[in-house]
Image (tube, grey):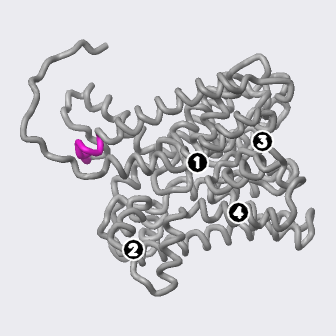
Amino acid sequence: PFIDALFTATSATCVTGLLTVNVADTFTLFGQAVILALMQCGGIGIMTASTLFVLMLGKSVSMKGSSIVLSEFTVSNKIDIRKMVKWVVFLVIAIETVGAAVFFIFWVGKLGVAKAAWAAIFHAVSAFCNAGISVLPEGPASMGNSTVVDINFMFLMCAGSIGFITLIEGCEWLKRRGKSQFRFSLHTRIVAIATLVFILIGVAGFFIFESENILKGMSFSEKITSSFFHSISSRTTGFQKVDFSLLEPSTIQMFIILMFIGGAPGSTAGGVKITTFAVLFFIVISRFRGSERVQMLGRTIPDEEVSRAGAVFIFLFVFLALFVVVLLAVNPLHAGAPIEAQDSDLPLVFESVSAFGTVGFSMGITSSLSLMGKGLIIFMMFIGRLLGSILVLTLAQSIRPISYELTEESIMIG
């Protein structure tokens, strides 16, 4: 059906991973190739891909276009746009090639050369671009448990979620190591620390909440590997190795929070972004310390960035809350949904946040959505991919000075 084709195309382009049909069983090789191309374009950014094509034709990029592309990938506009795009393309090709090679080595014995090569390339792109779409019948779980393969998935998902500016600085550090001193930017340090913190929170939560449920019967090492896999996937990609309709409500609630937060700015991940959440967290810390300005890791955050973070978080939270209300009103769960999900609104809330955060986790209700429900999720995937960037660019415009100031008057807080 057209709605399912549109749903799949949107999910691939917005690197979400929610699907109403099984890609492996439904699409031909050509269809899968189209999905692969959409994931790759969506992952590196439509704007950056367009800029790359212009550069390949030997044409210049406008100042406005250069500013928009740089705002997607870096905190500074003092970087040559050609150098930035070359870095992005190089990193994408290098990381995906390494990931595909590892998949191929471990899958060729089970799938054969041709199928293993295609599956390796597809999953390397899908994992790095944080799309979470698989050409295996049951996703990554189809190939059984392999620690090396799971680590490869986690490496690709993390690399895609931390942002290109962090990857570029990491490469620069490796090049200069032992030759000259290199200082990571505040942005990169915040991304690295926040990413590690949220991964560990997800691991601890999944391990504790699911030890006597979905993880029961697994060895300790398998429980740890599965916890890391789903913790990393929850903020970025959406690859699942277990049935989410069987998870504990506490685990689902934890994943809703992690999906809403998402990955780093300038990455292939969605959400409100971990730097936004970090700034809001340190607002509270700074106030408790009695500091008027927000300070993080030995630096003071500009006031305009603090207010921008608050505006982005509040706007996106309210937008998502209103969307959930509309979806619950027009799409009550019916007989097509898993039995475990039919007596609760939680699966629809979970689906909405997953679409907004372009994650792709689902409790198994996507294919059972009504036509209106599918249309709303398509809309949310599209908005989730673009709204945050559009909002940041809008708020980043110069603030117009005013020639007067209104009288102050206090209100009660708390």
Residue 332 seen: yes
Q: Amino acid at mark 2?
A: Ile
Q: Please give the residue where the numbered disc 1 appears in the rendered image.
A: 382
Query: Is residue 303 part of the magenta span, yes or no?
Result: yes
- Going from N to C along the chain, the mark reached first, 4 or 2, is 2
The C terminus appears in which quarter of the rendering? top left
Q: CA distance from mark 3 to mark 1?
A: 35 Å
Q: Amino acid at mark 1?
A: Phe
Q: Nearer the viewer, mark 4 or mark 2?
A: 2
Give the residue at the far bottom of this rendering.
Answer: 58
| Mark 3 vs 1: CB contact within 8 A | no
Q: Please give the residue where the numbered disc 4 appears in the rendered image.
A: 124
The stretch in magenta equals 299-306
Q: Secondary structure at mark 4?
A: helix
Q: Please give the residue where the numbered disc 2 appears in the rendered image.
A: 81
Bin the neighbour count of mark 4 within 10 Å (Cα to Cα): few under 14, some 14-19, many 20 and up.
many
Q: Please give the residue where the numbered disc 3 appears in the rendered image.
A: 222
Q: CA distance from mark 4 to mark 2?
A: 26 Å
Bin the neighbour count of mark 1 within 10 Å (Cα to Cα): few under 14, some 14-19, many 20 and up.
many
Give the residue at the far left of this rendering.
Answer: 403
**Horizontal and vertical percent position of residue 337:** 82, 28
Q: Secondary structure at mark 1?
A: helix
Check the image and report above or below for 76 versus 301: below
Q: CA distance from mark 3 to mark 4?
A: 22 Å
Q: Amino acid at mark 4?
A: Ala
**Horizontal and vertical percent position of residue 41:** 61, 65
